[in-house]
Image (tube, helix red, strand yellow):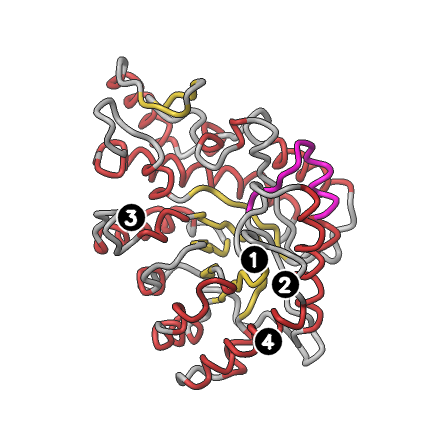
Amino acid sequence: MAIKKLYQGETSPIMATLIGSFPHKEADEALDLIFKYTPQIPSWPQLPKRDFREGMVAQFAEGLPCIRLGKDGIYLDESDKDRELERFYEDIITQDPSDFKINEDFAQGLWRFSERLERCDLSEVKFIKCQVTGPFTFAASINDSQGRPLLHDAVFMQVILKGLSMKALWQIEFFKRFGKKIILFLDEPYLGAFGSAYTALNREAVVRDLREIISVIKSQDVLVGIHCCGNTDWSIFTEVEAIDIISFDAFGFLERLILYAQEIKEFLERGGLLCWGIVPTQGFSSKITKDLLLKKLKDGIIAFKDKGVEEGLVRERMLLSPACGLGSLEIASTIPILTLLRDLAQDLK
């Protein structure tokens, strides 16, 4: 599980990080903000407004068999299915992450982030954060020729699990030269629909597939987080023992998470971390103040305490972030959101 203790001393600030995307078209503009406002856990920015290939599904589709990017979106082309699958599994057998490299056309922010790390002072950096789209969100976004999501195709679900795990391993290999602990997030907004009438996902299958992809990623010395910005059955994540960090929308769904206080308690006690997405990204306005968010955080800590989760444990196992990625916002909104995030991390001691 995660490291035993994040913070030493009562005056240590809570560390803050980010969830993937930025609205900028130039990576360096986003990186200036990342290193200014989240210097302890910087991350590479996804830039969906720069290029459609930087969307959270397209970005990791490069090189996967039969998956194509076209003017009308992402689609499946099975015209040469057997040959493409054979070649894909040959690459999987070799276990060479370089076969699953993410090229700069698909992730300018990743490559510029690497260049920035090479030339800047890393003394303040505690972790490097990377991300890959989770398998359920990825599979739900691509349909077969009959219009059915790949979630329900056993062959391509395995392709997605294995392909995304190798995309994660390539990132880990790419960034480990900087000598910092790496955090790898699986971004799973689709699992916000788990348990609703809108998805027929089976709990056993979700837990099984998460265990499969995370076991591959955890073969390296990394922390694995999972981010879901909607409401879900949070116990599906606490049941996957190898998950180190659960990232949630604390502004919108804190009360729902507290319903799982016993599962969260066990998760924290075995070394897990909660990443509180406390600064809202959707509907953000000047009415969202630091005092309002501090009160929400403290009320949440007290609510966990009332459910039997020790206050010190909650604080010790806490990270902060925005509720979700910033990619859909206007650039002008990013600085007030990041300023609040930084100030909350400093004040919540």
Residue 209: which numbered mark, if any? 3
Q: What element does badge 1 sit on?
A: loop
Q: Report the residue at 23% width, 55% height from top.
A: 203
Q: In 3D space, how far apart are the residues under numbered discs 1 and 4 (Cα atoms)?
A: 14 Å
Q: Are marks 2 and 1 in contact (CB under 8 Å)?
A: yes
Question: Hey, which quadrant is residue 11 in on the image?
Answer: bottom right
Residue type, mark 1 in image: Pro
Q: In 3D space, how far apart are the residues under numbered discs 2 and 3 (Cα atoms)?
A: 38 Å
Q: In 3D space, how far apart are the residues under numbered discs 3 and 1 (Cα atoms)?
A: 30 Å
Report which residue position mark 2 lands on.
288
Q: Are marks 1 and 4 in contact (CB under 8 Å)?
A: no
Residue 62 percent coordinates (x, y): 45, 26
Report which residue position mark 4 lands on.
295
The answer to which of marks 2 and 1 sits earlier in the sequence is 1
Question: Which one is in front in this view, the residue at disc 2 or the one at disc 3?
Answer: 2
Local packing at callout 3 (Cα closer than 10 Å; few below 14, some 14-19, many 20+) is some
Q: Report the residue at 32% width, 38% height from top.
A: 140
Residue 168 percent coordinates (x, y): 47, 41
Residue type, mark 4 in image: Lys
**Drawn side of residue 31 relative to residue 292, left or right:** right
Q: Name the quadrant of the C terminus.
A: bottom right
Residue 274 percent coordinates (x, y): 49, 66
Question: Which one is in front in this view, the residue at disc 2 or the one at disc 4?
Answer: 2
Report which residue position mark 1 lands on.
280
